[in-house]
Amino acid sequence: MSSTEVIPSAPGSLPLVGHALALARDPLRFVLALAAVGPLVRFRLGTLPVVMVCEPDLTRQVLLDAHTFDRGGPLIDLGREIFGNGLLTCPASAHHRQRRLCQPSFHPRRLADYAPVFSAAAQRLTHSWHDGQVIDANSEMRQLTTQTAVETLLGSTAPPSETRAVLVGDLETISTGALRRMLCPRPLNALPIPFNRRFGLAHQRLRHALASTAASRRADGKRSNDLLDSLLTAVDTDTPGAGSVLDEHEVVDQALTFFAAGIESTANTLAWALVSTAASPDVATRLGTEADTLLGERAPTMALVPALTTAARVVAETLRLHPPLTMANRVVMHATELGGHHFAPGTTIAWSPYLIHHHPGLYPHPDRFDPDRWQDTTPDRRTYLPFGAGPHRCIGDHFALTQATLTVASIAAHWTLTPVTDQVPRPTAGLVPRPHPARLRVTARR
């Protein structure tokens, strides 16, 4: 068994900053380049040494053993600053209790309640377009997921449109600034410069809005069929005392996590799905045929989701090509072995669904958008990781898949989308890369 010191290092390290600049400039290119170095690769974020896991079996070992490889490192530390200690960021010691308390919010029965919200929002958006209009897929899908996130989370207590616009703008400030703060030395993040002030104000305002809404809901005692109600009323019978319910801070942590994921990640997936199908006329044609056969003029429903196989394959392939997360971290909690190497406690481990999904040995022509690769097979849990794996797998995976499938089908029923330019969309730099350019022309099918 070898120590981590003999693991090969990524080229291009710079004094003081290590590989932080390369990661900030082009995260996807940096991550993919690591796979050519070896199954395990060392790199540095500033002075922090990190080991990237580049093979699916090793990645799965890290994800399944949450007690040995616990949540930690720069991404998680940043996440805790923004989202608190919710499901996205909490350590293994707190995760099991939180997961039990949040699970009712995503029970299949609740998902059937959310599906009409997804469908209605997609119908409203597509009915607002006109023949020949040029849309920006990023902004349109963000508008859509904002509506559904607010309605499914807050229901009847959703804020007015003016307040909602401010909160969504705050979330945009947080999401676009997250990578910058992660790669900056901590002392710089504390300086009172304009960027830090904007980031801090956005974070404070967003948490305050959710806390006020939760407090008002607790005070009036009225029940509502939404995610917030589910969080406020959840009881864990396996935990005695006060820990059997989510306290005020925990409710806000979970609500903020679900709010951000419901808007940012799903909007990004849908934008990539639209851009990719617009550039693939044969796929778009099959989507339209499926929508004609199953929907006609009707809005899609939860009952139709299993039959929307073409739409589901488009979503699955989009999540392979453009997973919601580029890279995440774990920290070794006690001495262990991984890939024939000894890892000491405190070692920072990185893993990347993007890297695994673009491995040519796992996916032929990995950069090609090919929904048909899922026609006669289902995603392998070892090599398909858009929602992670193991005990920390995303709790909202079926929520996101249902919304994405219903939305893709709704759009295909009414519109044919075509690119405005011949320029191939490229991912923007960021933790959740968006397609650019994303301008599409919509043409009425009926």
Image: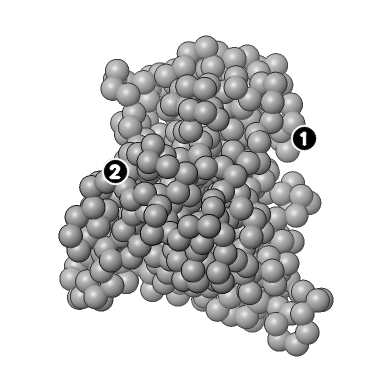
- Which quarter of the image is occupied by the C terminus? top right
Q: Position of residue 154 (x, y in %)?
A: 59, 62
Task: State whether residue 114 is above or below residue 288.
Answer: below
Q: Residue at x 34, y 28 (%)?
A: 425
Which residue in the protein does label 1 denote?
A: 303
Callout 2, which amino acid? Asp
Callout 1, which amino acid? Ala
Residue placed furthest toward the right: 237
Earlier-in-chain disc, 1 versus 2: 2
Q: Position of residue 268 (x, y in %)?
A: 45, 41
Q: Secondary structure at mark 1?
A: helix
Q: Quadrant of residue 66?
A: bottom right
Q: How many marks?
A: 2
Which residue in the protein does label 2 denote?
A: 26
Q: Secondary structure at mark 2?
A: loop
In the displayed structure, does residue 422 sit left or right of residue 14?
A: right
